[in-house]
Image (cartoon, rainbow, N blue to C red):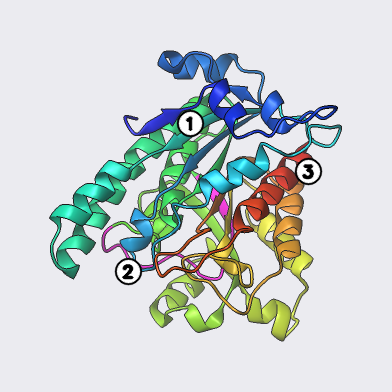
Amino acid sequence: MQHLKIYSKQDVLSLTKLRRFETKLGEQIQVVQDPFQLEQSIKQSTAEYILFGIPEDIGVKANESLGGTDTAWIPFLQSFLNIQSNDFIGGSEILLIGHFDFGDIQYAIENNAHGFDERLEAYRHAVNIIDDEVEVLVRLITANEKIPLVIGGGHNNSYPLIKGAAKGLHKAGIIPIAQINCVNLDAHTDYRPVEGRHSGNAFRYAEEDGYLQKYCVIGVHENYIPQNIWIDIVNNPFIDLISYEDIFILEKRNFTQAVAHATGFTEDNYIGLELDLDCIENTLSSAISPSGLYPLHARQYLTFAATDSKIAYLHICEGATRLNDGRKSETTGKLISYLVSDFIKARE
């Protein structure tokens, strides 16, 4: 994991605004005691949750989408570390490792790959490097019976999260085979064909490689389901889909019923709990939408699923505070902070 940057307590406190008569999460959160003994530090920690970031947009660019998903991690941290430490959420239950920095790979691609096709191929090759490093860390965390809290980054990272969690839980003797389920709140299925790794096909790769057993995606926009993917899903008993239109336009079931269906469909195994921020209306992301869920729905989703499922990991991805076309948002980081804290509070 040569691209993993491990934080010290001083790094954490530099982002924490200390205030008299108050205690912030950044003051209570745990850090790695010995960067050269990462596994030992994780194993010995009393924390249940292991937090790290993957601020990259390589997978998004490999999917021919707009870059910017590398910008949400630090704003999230600045918000999250300044939450009040209180009876609702303390901070000591979390170990903050740090983040992956793949900037050297991005720099090499942008300065050496010429032309659209060559650059696209280079980005897709680079995603494999990200996959390998993320998988190692997630496998290490889950093998020690901790829950990874992962902030992206593109949705490409679901593949190494699924693979790493499946291997880690199996190594720990928690599951009989290295295979888990996934529930995803998303405007898209991210089940595109195997054509080289990118942010649009993580779940397809995870399934074909044997690490994903069941997959249920909630809130997909019917306008963005390719016909070939729709046919694949309809004919696969291990995949289910509840569209945005079924919930909010046709009102075949309400949102809580949709989430309950997803957790019921996947209840026979541990789940990777996924949330793609492009499903939330007007939230800055690689595929921002004028029509979608409200932040309230996303918070309810994580709270419900956290209490109704056996959790392998939490992954919140695709958010941005600045896109490559110049659009900006000052609230994305704070939104992610609410979502992570909701998840933790729901499980206490």
Q: Position of residue 272 (x, y in %)?
A: 57, 47
Which structural element holds mark 3?
A: helix
From the image, give the main secondary structure of the stretch colored magenta: loop
Residue 167 among those drawn in magenta:
no
Q: From where the camera sits, is residue 167 visible?
A: no
Task: Identify the magenta region.
Answer: 180-196
Query: Within 10 angstroms of label 3, few (less than 14), some, or many (20 or more) residues?
Result: some
Residue drawn at point x = 61 percent, y = 42 percent:
78
- Position in image of residue 302 (x %, y %): 70, 52
Residue topped by disc 3: 346
Residue located farthest toward the front when viewing the structure as drawn: 20
Please name which of the two marks, 2 or 3, marks the residue nearer to the observer.
2
Q: Residue type at mark 2: give it.
A: Glu
Instruction: Check if mark 2's residue and mark 3's residue have beta carbons within 8 Å.
Output: no
Q: Report if residue 336 is visible in the image.
A: yes
Is label 3 or label 1 in front? 3
Residue drawn at 31 percent across, 29 percent down: 2
Residue 325 is left or right of residue 313, and the answer is: left
Residue 194 left/right relative to 177: left
Amino acid beneath label 1: Gly
The foreground one among 318 and 199 is 318
The residue at which mark 1 appears reads as: 168
**Is disc 1 placed on a helix, strand or loop?**
helix
Task: Measure the C-alpha gap from mark 2 to mark 1.
Answer: 32 Å
Question: Which numbered marker is on residue 64?
Answer: 2
